[in-house]
Image: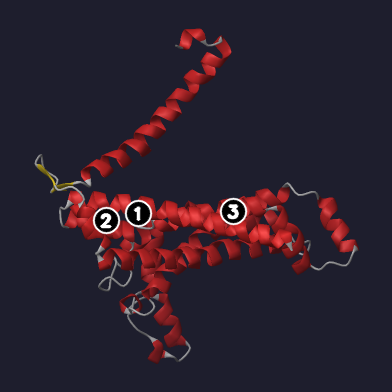
Amino acid sequence: MLNAIKPKTRTVVLYLMVPVAMFIFTVFVPLITAFVYSFFEWKGGPQKTFIGIENYTKLFADGTFWEAFGHNIYLVIACIIGQIGIAFVLVMMVNSKLVYCKTIHRTFGFFPSTISAVCIGLIWNMIYHNKYGILNWFLTAIGRKDLCQVWLNNTKIVMLLVTIPLIWQYIGYYMVIILSAIASISTDIFESAEIDGANGFQKAVYITLPLIKNTMLVCITLCIAGNMKAFDNIFVMTKGGPGTASMVMAMYGYQISFNQSNMGYGSCISVGIFVLSLLVIGGSQALIKYATREKEAK
């Protein structure tokens, strides 16, 4: 088959075969394997019992899984606003003529994204610690010791507390993406707007955003995909607790698979995460494109 292809094309095909094969092996093979195992009752050993769609029936009625799904949606919404929204505002500030040493701001802004999520979890776990955490120390220092508490044991705000580190870590990541998109916009457009009397807010909303809308859509897609499989820092900080107050889908799948040694149902949860992630990403893209068309029609 390769002999019938032109030499230059054959070389390109051969080079592409390696990454494509690696992608198939690392993505599609585990996904197909998980899908097959989801039809079995399997405790991780050599014995597997075929049970049909029983795991999927159980999943649809699993209140903990759907609670975890709700927590993932909370993360998605909060991080789209927090990560991408704050990143866009910071980019506008960094690009301002009033800001000096722009390279230093970009470097320090991106720095948290290079730290391991486990380390981020440990750092913020220390910040929230009830005995030696900086948060309780600060409240005590300003005379509000009555507000001190075991922060990560508060079921009402624990999701907010585990979301803050995620937002903090990835603001710089989206700053870099948005900065690269804005760099491709001709400066003549901004200069013309300034001559016409446009202020910074008007340039950001009416010029910059429409011109980088495709990049923003990519950022939103990356944000949704990342937060639908959130695991690392939440596992380090709360392990899904107290109770299931900060449980997310990936952590629930981990607990079922490894803590309870129920690999069959854990595989079913993995398939559920994959399907729900596709639905959320596809739905968000369709909604954004529909809103864009409606705006352009007006």
Say which mark, if any, is on residue 217: 3
Which image quarter is the N terminus in? top left
Q: Secondary structure at mark 3?
A: helix
Q: Secondary structure at mark 2?
A: helix
Q: Are marks 3 and 2 in contact (CB under 8 Å)?
A: no
Q: Residues within 10 Å of mark 1 (few under 14, many from 20)?
A: some
Residue at 32% from the left image edge and 56% from the top image edge: 250
In the drawing, does residue 201 fall left or right of residue 22? right
Residue at 45% from the left image edge and 23% from the top image edge: 17
Q: Amino acid at mark 1?
A: Ile
In which quarter of the view is residue 291 placed? bottom right
Residue 34, given in percent of the width and then of the height, sits at 27, 43
Q: Are marks 1 and 2 in contact (CB under 8 Å)?
A: yes
Say which mark, if any, is on residue 253: 2
Residue at 40% from the left image edge and 88% from the top image edge: 147
In which quarter of the view is residue 294 placed? bottom right
**Can I make out residue 11 in this image?**
yes
Of 109 and 287, nearer the camera is 287
- In primary-sequence order, the first of circles 1 and 2 is 2
